[in-house]
Image (cartoon, helix red, strand yellow):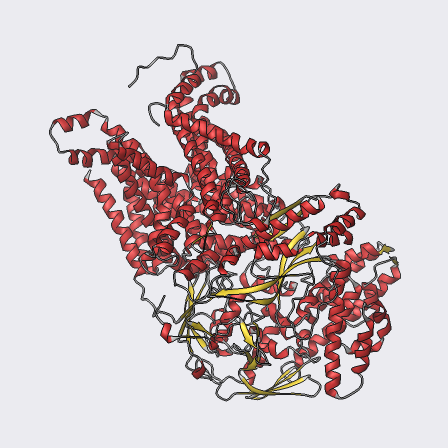
Amino acid sequence: MSTRVLPPPGHSPGARAWRRLKRNRLARVGLVLVTLMALGCFCLPALLHLDPTTTHPAFRHQPPSAAHWFGTDGLGRDYAARVLAGGQTSLLVGLVATLTCVVIGVLYGAAAGYYGGRVDEVMMRFVDFMYGIPYMFLVILIMLMFSESARGDPVPVFVALGLVEWLTMARVVRGQVLTLREREFVLAARLLGAGDLAIIARHIVPNVLGIVTVYATLTVPTVIILESFLSFLGLGLKLSWGQLVSEAVGVVNPVAVYWWLLAFPSAFLAVTLLCLNYVGDGLRDAVDPKGH
Amino acid sequence: MGRPGTQGGTLSALEAAAVAFGVATLAGAAWLPPKATRVSGASFGGLIAFALARLAWGVPVGALASVTFALVLFRFAPGAVLRRVTFLVPSLLLLVFVTTLLMYHAPGSPFAGEKVASPQVEAALRAHFGVPKSAVDFFGIYLRRLVVEGSLGPSVKVQGRNVETLLRPALPVSLTLGLLALVLASAVGLWLGIVAGLKPNSAADYASTGLSAIGLSLPSFVLGAIGIVLFALKLGWLPVAGWGDLRHIVLPAVTLALPHAAYIARLARGGTIEVMSQDFIRTARAKGLPESAVVLRHALKGAILPVVSYLGPAAAGIMTGSFVVETLFGIPGMGQWFVRGAINRDYSVVLGTALVYASLVTAFNLLVDLAYAWLDPRVRSRS
Amino acid sequence: MYRTLLGILSVFGAALLLVALTFSKTLEAPADLRLANGTEPKSLDPELTTGEPEHVLASALFEGLTRIDGKTGKPVAGVAERWDISADGTVYTFHLRDDARWSDGRPVTADDFVYAWKRLLEPAVGAEYAYMLFPVALAEAYNTFAGHAETLEKQLMPAVTALATQSPLDARSWQDFLRRNKANDPLRPVDDDVLGELLARRTGTLTASDLATFRARLEHARAWLRDESVRARAHFGVDHGVIAKDARTLVVELRAPTPYFLQVLAHNSSMPVPRWALAAHGDRWFLPGNIVSNGPFRLANWIVNDHIRLEKSPTYWGKSEVRLERVDMLSNENQMTILNLYLTGALDCTNRYFPQELAPELKKRRDFEQAPGLVVYFYRLNTTRKPLDDKRVRKAINLAIDRELITKSVLGLGQAPAYTFVPPGLPAYTAPATAIRHDPDEARRLLAEAGYPGGKGFPRVGILYNTMEDHKRLAEVVSDQLRRTLGIEVTPYNQEWQSYLEAERALNYDIARAGWNADYADPNTFLEMFVTNGANNQTGFSSELYDRLIRLASDVSLLARDPDPTLAKLREPEPIRALLAATQSGSPTDREHARERLRLLLLREAESILVEDEFPIVPIYFYVNGTLTQPRVHGYSMRVLLDDGSFGPNLQDTHPLRDVWVDPAHKGEP
């Protein structure tokens, strides 16, 4: 064990957590890789003038080469461009759906925990009820509802996934709030005549942000995997890692081994998910070093 | 919305009122006195056990399961558990209603075919299958059929059969697959996790963590597809798809289990490390207990508690995974019915599978809670 | 601690018990032949089903008056042993075999057919394929006229009354009104010149008196439809249309000579059904244990979502010709799974269910066989929406697509690029001249002429397809070609089947993928769908001349009444005028012959409206059907024997199981 330098007094819990996170090697590597991945997916296509849509059917199914680093797909499109473009949507789905889920989960959980009693009971029963429904079921139904107006627009996918993923977040936040509301500073604020909303906004929410960040980080990979399931069932996005992977699964066959179609998006997907998981774990240890 | 020919449209006042009523009922159950909750919880639990078991194995087994389950619940279950069961029945009603609304508001109708039917033909079909144009009417017909005939209604897309006839052979298939996957995931996950946790940062740890990393970071259908190519097409050891004998179950069960095995391994590793660093382990070793006994007695316990609490979500996850895995391996189980029902707008099929799934998840969560209480006496006193 | 172990062990035990319970069911004997049959069949009722998997099963379980011969692909004697056709081609007398038996031993009688046909045509039964029997006299009246009369009375007439307050009305709103109220459908059978003129009014205005006339004619039409329907109810199956002269003689009267009628009789919609089984079991009569059938096979087992087991029927009259004992029909729609099953020997034939993306690789295999089919793959264009309401834009889109590249490099199975609509290979029908070709320059010129030079100002349009990998690939290539050639934004997007059908029907799309499969080998099945407001038109396309040509083709004698106004509008009137004269003189056979050629020429003129003037569609390619079949399977061929002794393509991709056999020398091999 290396010698520990105690944080200088007066530093916020956030700064302390960040310091602890930086000491976690896996999390550090993960964070760097995820950042690189995001930068790559969003910047490289423009920098290298990669085009994911132009088809050249005559040059289809070319294995990787100098001209096409990741080869070409069944319509002769540059596969590197497609993998990167797919990364954009996959990461966006992860982010936006997670944001949706954070907003709903934090508000719901904070309200249930803060008011407690019967309100809490009823609100948590509803969460239990939602837990009892296989979430894929809801996602599919929501997707079907939007299938007509969306025209391949990714927003319904974001919403659907966010709408089913907020439950864990709500539970975690509620648990934290239950203990927080008994703490001195909350009681003091209440005695000073602060309203419920003000207390929730000023005292409760800032104090659950740490744990929220942890779960949000862990929600992103879950959402990305869920989207790939939807793609596999034919209800996903037009171009995402999940979509590329499920298309490739459709042609993994001894008759014709187009290995690059499966290998590249899978690798990108796996690396991203793995790193996000490590970052999430690292964050958890950093925010709550005593375990959860 | 509101184009001619669509069933969709904005929520009518009647529909909104019905949803509000459902939520209110759900909330009302929170005010039941403890004694009443005990009775209602146990009887509801029995009811659900009966419904499920009858579907899979027929009335006698169903009745037996129902009575046993109700008695067990009444005698042993903690109050919190029974309270949850009490919520279940109104919850399921709400589920059916909300699902009906969602389906009716989605575009497309179950009666659209490639050849366009005249309005008269469509009207005849709607009347025959009990699928009127309004969601509320449909809900009424559905409930009446459920209560009076104990039937989940006819399927539109697989004609001549009721949904329960379709689900009866499918339920054991999915249950078998799911349970096997769960057992496999627990066994493999625990083993990997404990091995890794006993010697952190060793080669064994890295190997096990690496394995679980793969399981966590790839969608199961990718692993399944690779499995098919390797074990079915290249080596010819296992069949590609289908259902019929024991060899058919291997690949799907493994595919379904892998992500969860990976997660369980992580949980178990953490638990083991925590237990092994505690003082009583040192004491036990100092007493000269053989290492195997130490591991078996203490490490296993440390590993297993976090895992048990994960089993509830794992079961739900395995069911979701089964949608994908059953499609990939062409298995005639519940998951396929749900996906196909939703895509074909076969309303009764969707509702039937939703009901069965929701009851299963709840039942399983209950079992996990009971098991947890049984394993860890502290929990029992807490409730 | 031991509790933990005990708990784990008991869960294990329970799981194993479950596994054992699930697999304890008795195993079936291995099948002689295992075929991929696509999606799970909806029903086995031959009259109520529409899909291809159901058609294959129904043809194995049941047999109509005729059946399709596996070797020649032509209709041959089925339950009817022979038949006589009257000189004018409108009366068929069928003589039924005396050894035709149901699987419960009862004889198959003429009454069984009368019962089945009346059931098919009964509106309350809701059979989608009822129109297959419309060539039979009174059949259409029996099936639809009561409904049409009701639609007129309850919908159209009140709507017209309400509309009357808005007169005078410009012709455009008038056509909108007709489309919205689906006016053409119930009025199509009505022969009324005044009504026809008003329905076709596309210019000028409609006065209040026009509307009043229209309403009066509607009332008249309603009364006529009602009377006809009553007449059909009283006479069809009794002394008109179809008549059971005795137990083994069935007389069928047609409303006009129909050259493809014997093919129709082999189709599942006109097969007999066992009335006593229906009475006993209601809509469950086709389930195992209940079903009674008269075909070469009977239903042995049905595991939903898995497979259907057929076994040779011991009561079938031709059982000595049936060589398969047991057949498994696999219900699975996952093309990759099917291919993999085939590659591991768990399946003997993939049928058409293999991934198209692998077609070029599969084509190299020796066990792969293919033949062109009577199917056209096309895009519908929504002619009611901007910018596709401009036919220059529609033509530009047609010219911008490189079909050669698509068929050669994207599809790769030898599909033919489609520059016309009706697939080649139909007897005696030749495709019309067409303006559709690959001409990017002309396409750009047309687009500029329509007001969108270089695609500027062109609104974003979508290509709708139903969720499936093959459609997705094509939509992506086509949208890329349109984008690059015309500089317009095109987004491909998918919807699952039920939503897709509804979007097409409600004209809620810009461009939509479609395919059309021939119900019978005649151009009529392709061209009839684009009549104004036809149920399968779904493009908003409407042309008075087109409607008239289709109507004339269904009864060419109508043309003789007043040929000149029609002929004046045609592209090639001279051959038609000559044939018209030929239908009125010469021997009956010559006249019959001339009538048939005239009919085909009229259809050809109609097709040329689609591909030369109006372009409501974008034909893309004509299908090639292919299958992987293990070498031990015989008689499952993509080729059929022609009259001249040579081989031709199996255009309808039909493979009657009764004519398939398995080489015993190969038996048991994977």
Q: Residue B319's x, y, as percent?
A: 40, 47
User: Which quarter of the image is occupied by the N terminus of chain C?
Assistant: top left
Q: Residue C492's x, y, as percent?
A: 62, 48
Q: For the view shown, which residue lies furthest in the front direction?
A: A66
User: Which quarter of the image is occupied by the C terminus of chain C?
Assistant: bottom left
Q: Quadrant of residue A271?
A: top left
Q: Is residue C60 visible?
A: yes
Left or right? Give the position of B75 relative to C558.
left
Front residue of C451 and A55: A55
Q: For the view shown, which residue lies furthest in the left direction?
A: B288
**Number of numbered callouts drawn:** 0
Q: Residue C596's x, y, as percent?
A: 72, 78
Please determine whether, in this image, residue A169 is positioned above or below residue C302.
above
Query: In the image, what residue occupies the spot 82% across and 81% down?
Result: C581
Left or right? Give the position of B74 relative to A192.
left
Q: For the view shown, which residue lies furthest in the top direction?
A: A9
